[in-house]
Image (tube, coloured by chain):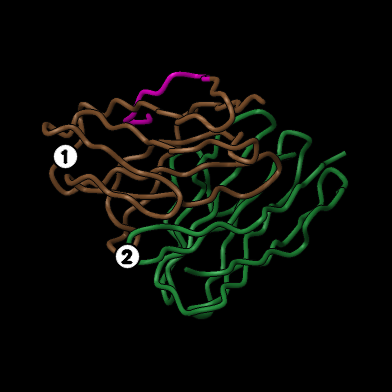
Chain colours: A green, B brown
Amino acid sequence: SAVISQKPSRDICQRGTSLTIQCQVDSQVTMMFWYRQQPGQSLTLIATANQGSEATYESGFVIDKFPISRPNLTFSTLTVSNMSPEDSSIYLCSAGGPYEQYFGPGTRLTVT
Amino acid sequence: DAKTTQPPSMDCAEGRAANLPCNHSTISGNEYVYWYRQIHSQGPQYIIHGLKNNETNEMASLIITEDRKSSTLILPHATLRDTAVYYCIVGRPASNTGKLIFGQGTTLQVKP
């Protein structure tokens, strides 16, 4: 299994600003993923973060809004840019084991 | 769109077995069945996965029908701590660039 940590655990941000969320894994992993969970909803995949290449975004998510970095096999960041109240969500990262994914505790973002 | 169908909610008495059904009639030959759960305010937790054989681990058992079009997750002796949203997901292994698409899941309420 893998242990995933995220920073910050929560934040309150003003409209129009940006927030970078960090995800750290305690072992080297090939695949990392970023999800969004809006209040009362299920998880929606934002993008797949591959080390050494650009992230692959799901439909409805674009790099200008959610730039992702993956500098090595244990770390990734997700930036939420030019935030609006609609971006208020929990953002989670996960890392892929051989046959399963392990999730971080999430970053609770509130945009005012 | 999610490729699985689950009942939105179920109740179970504490100490009894919880049987959570899932339909995945369009599953392809190289896709696995995964079960995750999300306890309130936490990241999802991997439970179990299977391809075509029944599987058991310390948390649960997974029963997959012979035609692979449906499965059942069994929690043999449910406790109050098992109250969570349970997600049935089909997909390729994470190490094979597979990604998990979450549906709405089943909210399991374990009652005293």
A49 or B8, which is in the foreground?
Answer: B8
Chain letter for mark 1, please.
Answer: B
Q: Position of residue B78 (x, y in %)?
A: 53, 36
Q: Position of residue B24 (x, y in %)?
A: 26, 29
Q: Secondary structure at mark 1?
A: loop
Residue that numbered label 1 is attached to: B28
* Count of labels in the image: 2
Is B69 displayed left or right of B109 in the figure? left
Judge left or right: residue B55 versus residue A9. left
Question: Image quadrant of residue B14?
Answer: top right
Residue at x-position 60% and y-position 66%? A4
Q: Quadrant of the C terminus of chain B?
A: top right
The image position of residue B84, as x and y in percent, is: 59, 35
Task: Decide whether the magenta segment is chiefly helix, strand or loop.
Answer: loop
Residue B4 in magenta stretch: yes
Region of the chain picked out in magenta, as a range: B1-10
Residue at point 55%, 57% (across, down): A103
Question: In the figure, B99 relative to A22: above or below?
Answer: above
- Picture quadrant where residue B38 is located: top right
Q: Is residue A56 left or right of residue A35?
A: left
Q: What is the number of the mark on residue B95? A: 2
For the point 41% across and 66% down, the residue is: A31
x and y, in percent, of residue B36 in the image: 46, 44
Q: Residues within 10 Å of mark 2 (few under 14, many from 20)?
A: some
Q: Tell me the amino acid under the disc marked 2.
A: Ser
- The quadrant of the image that shows the N terminus of chain B is top left
Label 2 secondary element: helix
* Foreground of the two, A75 or B38: B38
Residue drawn 44% across and 45% down? A58
Chain ID for label 2? B
Q: Earlier in the sequence, mark 2 or mark 1?
A: 1
The three-letter amino acid code for the residue at tag 1 is Ser
